[in-house]
Image (spheres, rainbow, N blue to C red):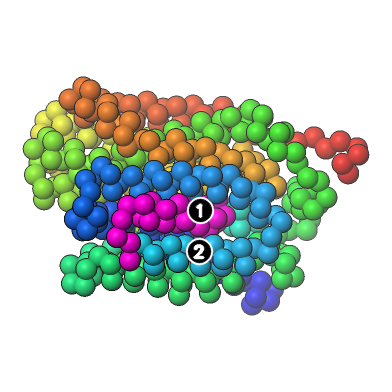
């Protein structure tokens, strides 16, 4: 085996992970650090400024819906590079924006660029480059993002305090371009594009050979995927995870509402982020060893456990339970990343994976854009965070049921004679 064959599959994990970092993670993760100075600079309320998030996410969803078909028709490296350049330009303009119209318009650009370089593209590329250890590969891509955010978040926080939000945002723009463009130009959609084979490819494996042949010769109709039972189950799974994972956004509010104080309010998200360094590789190892059908329910139960601990913390007014729960709750971010990829890979294969994940991801992004307001409304209507946590538990129970049903309804496309 050549050095190139050994290195390139893992290089694709690193590069697609870096694209996720400089677009999606940068502008949906660290943007929260800019909210206080943005509110002051724009002369608008917090609720008005935070409309940036749904504008960006809905734009991302529209872009994601086109990824599955577009990526098969374009030169992927230039497609990704142009998307990064557009996002970088949008970010530079934001750093100079003086009114909300420009701010929202650039949120659209960042959303489209993130959709074209984000989770779905990463999943498609890794799926193509790995015949074995795919679940581990999905998680490894997420781990790149974990390390990036752990390093970047405190740096950007200090920069905002020392040089202001505009110069700090310009730094993010430069990171997007300097890291994103070279990463994009080295990415290849398929190993065959540079004369290589997927990691773990075995020519004696009949299933792999047939799948490779079908991908090249048979175009699966979109209708066959969208109207399949497998797609409906995948869509429900994606939406449930999107909604449940947004409970993390309410942790600081929960800590303040129950009287734990601002220190604990800040500690909960910090502990959650730090836990990702341990939970993400464990997720990768378990999904690789047990398979998604067995590992995903286990991790959903971990999520349920974190919600139960928060309920106990609320009822007994015990900070310790809340902090432990915050650590375990990091599983929501993992399920939202490699968890979606692993489940989609269980339900689809070949070209059907590209399209199935693209369409399911698009719809779930739109729904997920309204998750925080919906969860907040549950609390506001009942005046008790326990009801929010009960709702999330119900979603995770649904997730476990969907995994079981999905294992019996994976997508299979029967090829007609005239398609061969």
* Residues marked 2 and 1 touching at CB (< 8 Å): yes
Question: What predominant SS class does the magenta segment belong to?
Answer: helix
Residue 182: numbered disc:
none
Q: Is residue 241 visible?
A: no
- Residue pointed to by mark 2: 86
Residue appearing at x 22%, y 68% in the figure: 164
Highlighted range, magenta: 96-122
- Vertical arrangement, residue 392 with respect to residue 291, above or below: above
Q: Is residue 207 visible?
A: yes
* Crowd rating for badge 1 (residues with CA inside 10 Å; few <14, some 14–19, many 20+): many
288 or 344: nearer the viewer: 344
Read off the residue under disc 1.
112
Q: Residue furthest right?
A: 418
Q: In this figure, what is the number of numbered marks? A: 2
* CA distance for labels 2 and 1: 9 Å
Quarter of the image where the N terminus is located: bottom right
Residue 396 placement: quadrant: top left
């Amino acid at each position: 085996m050549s050095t190139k064959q050994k290195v390139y599959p893992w290089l694709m994990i690193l590069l697609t992970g870096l694209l996720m970092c400089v677009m999606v993670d940068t502008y949906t993760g660290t943007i929260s650090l800019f909210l206080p100075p943005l509110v002051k600079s724009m002369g608008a309320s917090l609720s008005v400024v935070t409309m940036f998030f749904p504008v960006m996410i809905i734009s991302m969803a529209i872009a994601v819906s086109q990824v599955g078909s577009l990526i098969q028709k374009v030169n992927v490296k230039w497609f990704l590079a142009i998307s990064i350049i557009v996002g970088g330009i949008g970010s530079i303009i934001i750093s100079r924006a003086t009114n909300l119209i420009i701010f929202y318009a650039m949120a659209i650009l960042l959303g489209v660029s993130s959709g074209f370089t984000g989770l779905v593209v990463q999943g498609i590329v890794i799926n193509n480059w790995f015949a074995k250890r795919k679940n581990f590969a999905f998680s490894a891509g997420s781990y790149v993002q974990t390390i990036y955010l752990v390093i970047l978040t405190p740096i950007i926080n200090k920069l905002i305090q020392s040089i202001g939000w505009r110069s700090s945002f310009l730094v993010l723009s430069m990171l997007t371009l300097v890291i994103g463009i070279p990463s994009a130009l080295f990415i290849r959609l398929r190993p065959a594009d540079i004369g290589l084979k997927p990691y773990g490819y075995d020519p004696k494996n009949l299933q792999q050979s047939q799948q490779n042949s079908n991908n090249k010769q048979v175009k699966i109709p979109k209708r066959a995927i969208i109207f399949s039972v497998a797609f409906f189950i995948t869509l429900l799974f994606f939406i449930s995870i999107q909604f449940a994972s947004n409970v993390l956004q309410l942790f600081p509010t929960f800590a303040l509402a129950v009287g734990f104080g601002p220190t604990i309010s800040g500690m909960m998200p910090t502990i959650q982020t730090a836990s990702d360094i341990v939970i993400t590789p464990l997720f990768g190892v378990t999904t690789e060893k047990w398979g998604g059908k067995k590992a995903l329910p286990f991790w959903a139960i971990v999520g349920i456990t974190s919600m139960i601990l928060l309920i106990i913390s609320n009822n007994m007014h015990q900070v310790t339970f809340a902090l432990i729960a915050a650590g375990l709750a990091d599983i929501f971010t993992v399920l939202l990343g490699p968890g979606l990829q692993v489940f989609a890979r269980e339900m689809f294969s070949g070209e059907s994976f590209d399209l199935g994940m693209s369409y399911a991801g698009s719809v779930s992004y739109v729904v997920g854009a309204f998750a925080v307001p919906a969860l907040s409304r549950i609390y506001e209507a009942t005046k008790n965070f326990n009801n929010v946590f009960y709702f999330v538990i119900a979603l995770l129970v649904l997730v476990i049921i969907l995994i079981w049903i999905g294992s019996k309804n994976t997508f299979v496309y029967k090829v007609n004679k005239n398609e061969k």
